[in-house]
Amino acid sequence: MSLLTVENLTIDIAHPRGTLHAVRGVSFHVEKGETLCIVGESGCGKSLTSHALLGLSPRVAKVEAGALSFDGTDLRRLKERQWQKLRGLKMSMIFQDPMTSLNPSFTIGSLLEEVYMRHHPGGRSAARARAIEILKKVGMSNAEERLHQYPHQLSGGLRQRVMIAMGLICGPDLLIADEPTTALDVNIQLQILRLMQQLKEEMGLGIIFVTHDLGLVARFADRVAVMYAGRIVETAPVAELFANPCHPYTRALINCIPVPGKTRPGEPLGAIPGVVPSLIGPQSGCAFRDRCAHATPLCAKTLERKRDGAAHVYECHYTPEETAA
Amino acid sequence: MSDDILLSARDIRRDFRVSAGFGKRARTVSAVRGVSLDVKKGGVLGIVGESGCGKSTLAKILLGLDEATSGEVLFQGKTMAGMNRKTRARHIQPIFQDPYLSLNPRKRVDTIIGLPLRVAGVPERDIRTRVAEMMELTGLPLRLAGTFPSQMSGGQRQRVAIARALISRPELVVCDEPTSALDVSIQAQILNLLQDLRRELGLTYVLISHNLAVVEHIATEVMVMNHGEVVEHRPTAELFARPGSAYTQMLLDSILTPEPGKGLPEIALTDA
């Protein structure tokens, strides 16, 4: 059984001009000790999806799913109190911006201890000991001293480590990270990624990593789900996805990024013409059709799921040979 | 000085006085420590470095938005110290990182794009034609002329920022992280547009970015900065093939190229 199973997740948001279908039937699973990267551009629904897994959807969002189970628990039936017992203990989240997601008026120590004490009866001293242990684990020097510091006294990289420490202090099975390294410098980003990889191997952590950076995905993911306009258009093991991208959007996305040594300097990049379609009102067919050079009238009507090997699934009427440039 | 140098900076230094807290003596932080550079006409100078290395401060000084503590900026061999802002704006224009912040939300698109001409005192009728020309050149449909920035996508907003920068026909455009707030598919559109415009209008760019892949793609020369100093400054292909310092090597090694199987780069990391 998978650590996390999501089937046919939909998120609708009421909008003055009709219903906004932000997430439109997303299915995936995550195993223990596996990193699933969800990659996509702004507005594709990747953040809404990841927040829904923790019951953190905005109140205006209507979340429905065919199945949503974590370690044998059906998440769809949870009340807020039950969510609170799960969050931080069994599954936790690291947010994008460590500058704004840490409460500035508490010390690092009290932020960490609060998470621990919420789930573990017993004194503050046990929580403090655990806080020091976890800060060391995430590679912070002089952990005892750090406990008395406030978030503003730390650099961006250290703050993100504190976020990760808060996420891991209770030893969860699943960590959901929403663009945790976007605001950081390249070498700090590398430190954080290495840390997450190491923790994954040591603790058998399942990781869902939401990002728009394909380079990062290639180096960090075990499996990848590519999202476009509220659907996963392609999912595959990472090597397979880059060696044999089947959906025209995945291919276009890979061609967009300049790669030193590969793309020719000064030559035009493979930009994707047009913009993401509006998801307000009823949707049909493939959402990428207006930006796709290979679209036919059929693409406006229906969707087709194709399989290329056991773990590689994509949503296109045509095979990669038929849609090759 | 040779004619093909459009802009040069000589030994630029910028110090900031930083308060260390109540009752403590203020200390001096040098953001830029003696930077000299030449920008060749028609070229693209990429400036790279980590956050806090002084690249944005340097850009502000080149644009005249901030004043150097010492050193001088020369445009076509003439010092810019005494040049008034309007003259300066005719020669040098900026494009900023975040098109959600750099456009006035209460003005319509055509007003935003035409502002540099209005400031320069160009008659209103001419402004209208030139705005239309510029919108076409930057790939903005004319029907968007009366809309507000909030009604546009990020890519369209950055096109507006580019149109505004180019309408007064400057020789030099200073782009500070022009694509880092954009999605990758839009980033490619904007990079292609900047390339096309450079060829068509004979522009010169200073491109500031922390994304080395973008710099490698666009820049003809690269200057690497660290702690306010120039680490090295060489033609792009040469720098990428044979980095001349451990710091540059570290930056190059940390690029996450989309090559699965390689894993995370094994490089020595400095402490955060």
Image (tube, rainbow, N blue to C red):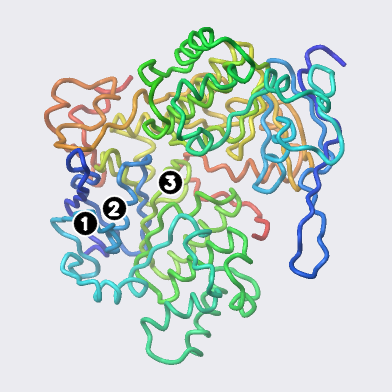
User: Given this view, does label 2 or label 1 mark the residue nearer the observer?
Assistant: 2
Q: Earlier in the sequence, mark 3 or mark 2?
A: 2
Q: Badge 3, how many Cα within 10 Å: few under 14, some, many 20+?
A: many
Does the CB distance between marks 2 and 1 fall below 8 Å? yes
How far across and how far down the image is residue B72, in percent?
A: 85, 31
The relative height of residue A17 versus residue A274 in the rendered view (above or below) is below
Real-space Cα separation, disc 3 to disc 2, in angstroms: 18 Å
The amino acid on which the numbered mark 3 sits, given as a three-letter code, is: Val
Front in this rendered view, residue A53 or A198:
A53
Q: Badge 2, how many Cα within 10 Å: few under 14, some, many 20+?
A: many
Q: Which residue is mark 1?
A: A6
Quadrant of image for the C terminus of chain A: top left
Q: Which residue is mark 3?
A: A217
Q: Chain of mark 3?
A: A
Q: Earlier in the sequence, mark 1 or mark 3?
A: 1
User: Given this view, does label 1 or label 3 mark the residue nearer the observer?
Assistant: 1
The relative height of residue B190 versus residue A155 in the rendered view (above or below) is above
Does the CB distance between marks 1 and 3 fall below 8 Å? no
Does the CB distance between marks 3 and 2 fall below 8 Å? no
The amino acid on which the numbered mark 2 sits, given as a three-letter code, is: Thr
Real-space Cα separation, disc 2 to disc 1, in angstroms: 10 Å
